[in-house]
Image: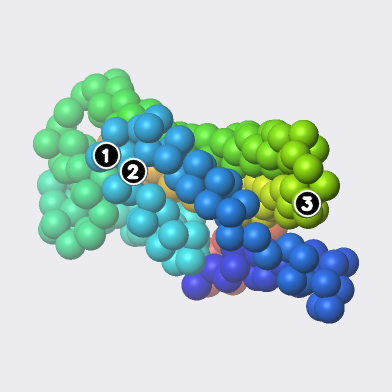
Amino acid sequence: MDITSILGVLIGAALIVQGITFDKLGNFWDPASILIVVGGTLAAVIASYPLNKLKSMGKHMGMLMSGKKFEAASTIDQLIDMAQIARKNGLLALEEKANALQDPFFKQAVMLVVDAVEAEKVREMLEGSVDNMAARHEDCAGIWDKASAFAPAFGMIGTLVGLINMLKGLNLDAGGASDIGENMSVAMITTFYGCILANLLFSPIAKKLRIRNEEEILYKQLIIEGVLGIQTGDNPKSLKERLVTFLDTKQQLKLLESESGGE
């Protein structure tokens, strides 16, 4: 479970509250401002995307909380195990392994090799699948980017609403001047709400979704290179040394040391 998204929001909110001080929190509560910023941002996002894309927003929350889904080390171990089987018993022996895989992409990659599809065609098909996936994920992150842009904009709209009402009030009799404070409050607080939503919620969500996308791309790149190495009959040890180059130095050393320790 990845709690950094919630932790970051809570820490940010706590620091803002600390800066405001508890006895003045009531000054920053304004339903009209919330209606303008939250309602306006939501309406603008709905107007910008078709329903089939908006329905995926609920899944995004699950992705943020689920933690790292793709483990590079275990994927490399699976590929090396398959490479050893293929060298001993041939590529057809991998069919049973492929049928046991839960990930459709991994299963497809192994079955393409089992079916003796040309290496160039295998790479083309799998990399095309990765490119399409990345494009879909970018569309998802783009929804939150749009929300991040809309929130401050509706904050400014709220500011204009408050200022217009305030200026209109100045043309009234002295009694009408009592609304100036309330109208000025709407003018200021809407900008405050818009900035918080954009920078503490929407932008971090978009960034986290892109990180999840990068993790999945790395996972699938490992599979592509691994199955192509298996298809060409690479030595399992050499294949592992090539695959670990996709990882950072610390992970590389850990995997290579575990191999030498096992020997």
Per the image, label 1 sits on a secondary structure element best described as helix
> How far is disc 2 from disc 1 in space, using C-alphas?
5 Å
In this rendering, does residue 152 appear at all?
no
Q: Which residue is mark 1?
A: 51
Q: From what the image shows, is residue 245 above or below residue 200? A: above
Q: Which residue is mark 3?
A: 175
Label 2 close to label 1 by CB (< 8 Å): yes
Name the residue: 53% across, 52% down: 35
In the foreground, 232 or 74: 74
Q: Which amino acid, mark 1?
A: Leu
Whichever of labels 3 and 1 marks the residue nearer the N terminus, that label is: 1
Instruction: For label 3, count other residues whose C-alpha is less than 10 Å away and answer few (under 14), some (14-19) or many (20+).
Output: few
Judged left or right of residue 202, residue 131 is left
**Image position, residue 198 (x, y; %):** 64, 46
The quarter of the picture where residue 140 lies is top left
Name the residue: 60% across, 38% down: 154
Whichever of labels 3 and 2 marks the residue nearer the N terminus, that label is: 2
The quarter of the picture where residue 100 lies is bottom left
Q: Which mark is residue 54?
A: 2
Label 3 close to label 2 by CB (< 8 Å): no
Judged left or right of residue 160, residue 126 is left
